[in-house]
Image (tube, rainbow, N blue to C red):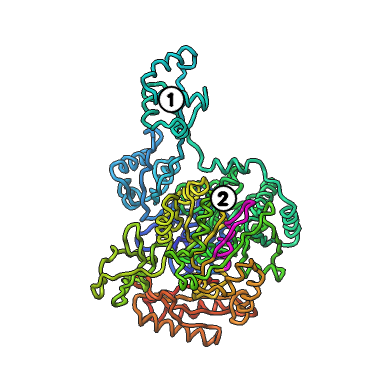
Amino acid sequence: MPFFINVILPLPLEKHFTYSVSRDEAQFLRPGMRVAVPFGKSKIYTGIVAEVHQEDPVIYEAKPIEQILDKNPVVTEGQLKLWRWIASYYMCTEGEVLRAAIPSAFLLESETIVQLLKGAEVRDEDLTDDEFLLFEALQRQSSMKINEIVQLLDKKTVLPVINSLVEKKVVVVNQEIYEQYKPKVERYVKLHERFSEETAMHELLDELGRAPKQREVIFTLFGMSAKGKVKISELAKKSGASAAVIKALIEKGILTELKVETSRFNRDLEEVTGRVELNEHQRTALQEIHNAFKTQDVCLLHGITSSGKTEIYVELIEEAISKGKQVLYLLPEIALTAQLIARLQNYFGQKVLIYHSKYSVNERVEVYQNVLRNSENARIVIGVRSSIFLPFHDLGLIIVDEEHESTFKQYDPAPRYHARDVAVVLGKMQKAKVLLGSATPSLESYFNADHSKYTLVNLDRRFGNVLLPEIQIVDIKEKHRKKRMTGHFSDRLLEEIRETLDNNEQVILFQNRRGFSPILECNTCGHSPQCPNCDVSLTYHSHNNQLRCHYCGYHMAMQQKCMACGSDELSTKGFGTEQVETELKALFPNHKIGRMDQDTTRGKYGYEKIIEAFESGEVHILVGTQMVTKGLDFRNVRLVGIMNADTLLNFPDFRAHERSFQLMLQVAGRAGRTQKRGLVLIQTYNPHHQIVQQVSTNSYLEMYKEQLEDRRNYKYPPFYRLIRISLKGRDYSRVNEGADWLATSLKNTFRENVLGPEFPPVARIRNEYYKNILIKIPQRQSLSKTKDLLGRVLQSFKAIGAYRGVKTVINVDPY
């Protein structure tokens, strides 16, 4: 009787592929193991076993597998179940989920690149013949593809050899290159031991009689610490000596230099050493959460900014791990992990693991394997949305912090999932409790809590009874009219910045656009340089004097003359973080300005460096995009300035007002987190806009009710579900015709609940034209039947030869 396995391949295939195996292999294999299998004419892929069975495939003859790669499953039954749900709900394939779910180092394929690990030390006797042959070859050439390794070793089964070398830390696969993290080193000096005797000390001072500066350094060192070590920077400052004088004393052997590695987060660790005592409001909220979890699996914690939500999370994490459970702590942004890790590692030591995309492939594999083995140091995982896919065994608690954030939604590539919603489903599957936390909950979550689907717990007092910041609105239309603007700063904002800096306090300025200026325009003919591949104007970046497209990365040198009419009268319109930074440097030349946006945080430790510099007071003013709005905790920020609220409000999206409210209130929450009350200034051309007014009075409920009424009237979530179909292709007329055909077919069934086809705000990206169709699904209409019908219509569409070049992208819950 033949045996077969169904394999999930890391490809967008609708079904599993079936391969034949021997009786022994069938008895050994279990769902979740990796196997290397041939696919197509010559390619080899790593797939995951979905099931072992004895049913012969009808359409094709099952090929035998190449080899088994694991002794134990690397994917758990629970993960496979979650993958099936994600593929079904978000209308994608299990292969696409597989690609997103496990580190790429697990998915070796014939195109995989293998490189030698830098600084790898290996003894010949530790390697097998094949491993040594590959090791030698990689010393001669920097990298090899798996196909080349097959030829080198003259055998097809090379994956075990590579896997073994990866485990021995000799090679890396598909390694991304990141800026290496340099530990922070402090330089200290102390007096050489031979001068510890009093007589030797007197002799030394006599000897230095002719070198008064060096003698002064020794006296100062004695004054600061007779026996211990002293920081070189502090010694130089106190003695008034230059670095050269201290260097001369070190070279003479009078001083001994010591280099001490210090954590960038030492300050933080000192601050949170010992558990913070919960206040009565936090204790009440914690008790309410406990009560909520007795009846419901999901609880929404609506806690205003700086109310101490993290301390409540810490208590809940402690309870979960004391029961031997695992905890997943989801964050919307890598920038947030930097501050939180220090706090949690201080409480829980080595039990905390971090998982996000700035880590190299090998580091991610290490975290994955720790969670898979259920090891003691994998009790708590902090991560961004992809950590939802880790192989948890016994999950007790999932915390989704800042649950309203749009960064929890994956837009490209598939699966286009929302981590908050998947967390709720994962919690149900693993019988874990889910806590959603936010100062400005998303309308859907609050609606679910309002309608008893979740439990709602409110925390409406700031920790230590600190007052909420005072929020003031600055009418820049009026300021322009009265000529009271300096660049993009109103006189009011400049005055407050000066006052804040004079008091040795810090400032955060928020502008939701990176770059220097979004548009370069000719004053003579009105032409502005456009991206040749996308329908957007090029953004000017002053630090490298380039015009750059933020969609496809196209760039060109800054133009000195208009490309259309040759005029040299060019001016920039609009402004981004870079321009704000440039203006600040001119206005406040004696203060250090920092910038936090996508351009400045590219390195692996980019976030930590900027946050650490701001926390330590090295940077006085921090300018940033929405990265600075997320739950960062800075103790010395008194003033927050929102440079232009209108760019947020005037966005073609039904969530624009909700998002603007959340962003503005979140960034406002960074101000005045200690006893002194903070101040927030919102610059806007439209000071009477209801959202700006609601932010100024901190009226979440007012915003919620108003937006909910709009959503009810215009048939948007949470009353209607949405599915967006995007058509894209290089041929403009084909995309247009295809979109019309598809919309007509859908309107036959869904009638007025189909909107479009419509061009999005940016209708061409990377030389592909886009057109969108939106399907609205009422609450009474079956979601699964709608998806089935949509699937059938799309199959008919793909069968039409004329539309073969048009791709369709389905996005469930797209916003």
- Magenta segment: 661-681
- Whole-percent x and y of residue 564? 25, 75
Q: Which amino acid type corresponds to the residue marked 2 in the rendered image? A: Asn
Answer yes or no: is residue 56 visible: no
Residue that numbered label 1 is attached to = 216
Picture coordinates of residue 101, whole percent (x, y): 51, 58
Residue under pointer 2? 636
Kindly state the secondary structure of the residue where label 1 is placed: helix
State left or right for residue 802 relative to residue 239. left
The x and y percentages for residue 707 are 61, 75
Vertical side of 594 occupied by 413: above or below = below
Whole-angstrom CA distance, mark 1 to mark 2, is 36 Å
User: 152 or 79: which is nearer to us?
Assistant: 79
- Badge 2: how crowded within 10 Å, few (<14), some, or many (20+)? many
Quadrant housing residue 104 = bottom left
What amino acid does circle 1 point to?
Glu
